[in-house]
Image: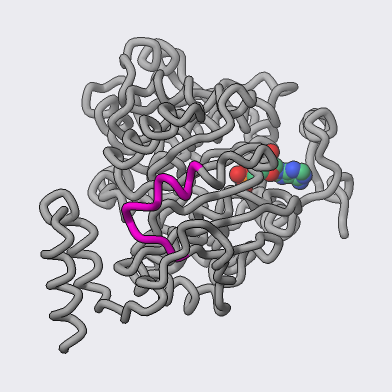
Amino acid sequence: MISFSELKLIDPIKLALKEAGYTHPTPIQAQAIPALLEGKDLLGCAQTGTGKTAAFALPILNRLVEANKRALPRHTRVLVLTPTRELAIQVHESFATYGKHLSLKYAVVYGGVGQSPQVKTMSGGVDVLVATPGRLMDLIEQGFIKLAGLDVFVLDEADRMLDMGFIHDIKKVLKLLPPRRHNLFFSATMPPEIEKLANSILVNPVKVEVTPVSSTAELITQSVMYVDRENKRPLLKHILDDDNLKRVIVFSRTKHGANKIVEYLGKAGIISEAIHGNKSQSARQKALENFRSGKTRVLIATDIAARGIDIDDISHVINYDLPNVSEDYVHRIGRTARAGASGKAISFCDSEEKVFLKDIEKLIGKNITLVEDQPFHSQVVVDSRLLSKGKAKTLIDGRNKLPNSRERQRSVHKSKKK
Ligand code: AMP
């Protein structure tokens, strides 16, 4: 294993790493940093938790210092695009941490908050700007941010960007970038559209791949519990009654569902907080802070809100609802077992979700252990046949419209006859 001292990073950066307690580069850092220091374009197939932020931030900082240029007012030398505000904040914090002994300026812009402080920060020009696409385009259109003269462009979590519908904003940003620039592209998964986008941005990239999504999380103990939908809340309470669950993220498919869980647990004497897109930015930040500091033990999150959250020591991930996109399962359980620690992932599965479970098992290449020894184990789920994926998705998405179990049963019955 190589150490940071073997990488050609300048001393102030090495010092910051030492202060952060990093001794050895993670695999993606060991592979990416030398190539990036040489100014090569990079295609990184890696998810959050692999150390990918430092993999790009360290060489970028190094090169900024070596180039010794100044950004013009309203300009930035480096642009990092991230899909969510939480990730933008974390990436910005990482630059500030690794670059704390350098006299460079770092800024972050994202939506959901007033733009004035962001405009003010940008007015003098910055070295590194981390941004979410919507607010960035807003500020560009108003003339507060200029991308001419940009040296480095980083697209982080490209697959999530696409999922969240940011492709048009990204294409608009790309049109504003100078043609000669250093490009870095990261994505946890590489479906064809992502590859196409990467090809349109990168020039002769070095490819770096760590922990392919399908084989990730070897250290995570994964289990599944069969439970009827109406028993999911009592089952969750039953599990959370165990104090050994120190820091728990519970994933809900919907924002409304997340609120309902918080309400139910509150009545049962278990304090939890929810983060999702309908919460204000300050409410989300506060919930995250409380969770990070250990004030709240249980965080209820939707996929998008949880994306990129960097909180160490998460002991358990509970999938209250199974995701219908299998990759989301891997992202979710990746919240635990960070940086070599072990963690546990427990998934609830009702009869409509069995098809999702099957897809997830196919993706991760193994069967998830079924735990029957729990008070709400459902024989109905054991016996139920798989719905087609389209049908299950319709049923789940239409739950508010289809709460009637007879109707649901009829659908199940119809699909069985097929
Ligand atoms: P990331 O994948 O960038 O979200 O990083 C995941 C976590 O690993 C963060 O908490 C980082 O602070 C931490 N980390 C990154 N690189 C290292 C390293 N070389 N040694 C120890 N921790 C690291």
Q: Which percent across, then down, holds residue 282?
A: 40, 18
Q: Residue at x 32, y 27 (%)?
A: 279
List the single residue furthest toward the front. Answer: 375
The residue sitting at 51% across, 61% down in the picture is 330
Report whether residue 143 is seen. yes
Query: Residue 111 lies in magenta, yes or no?
Result: no
Q: Position of residue 233 (x, y in %)?
A: 40, 45
Q: Nearer the viewer, residue 73 or 258?
A: 258
Q: Residue at x 62, y 31 (%)?
A: 95
Q: Quadrant of ligand 1?
A: top right
**Residue 385 vertical position relative to residue 333 in the rendered view, above or below:** below
Q: Is residue 148 something that shows in the picture? A: no
Prevailing SS of the magenta stretch:
helix
Name the one closer to the observer, 40 or 267. 267
370 in relation to 265, above or below: below
Q: Quadrant of residue 367?
A: bottom right
Q: Position of residue 171 (x, y in %)?
A: 27, 50
Q: How many marks?
A: 0
What is the x, y in percent for residue 395?
19, 63
Quadrant placement of the N terminus: bottom right
Tell me the quarter of the picture where residue 379 sits.
bottom left
Q: Nearer the viewer, residue 43 or 19?
A: 19
What colour scheme does the image use? Answer: one colour
Does the magenta segment cover residue 233?
Answer: yes
Relative to 350, 58 lies left or right: right
Whether 101 is drawn above or below 311: the answer is: above
Residue 391 located left or right of residue 187: left
- The stretch in magenta equals 226-237
Instruction: Give the position of the C terminus as an image quadrant.
Output: bottom left
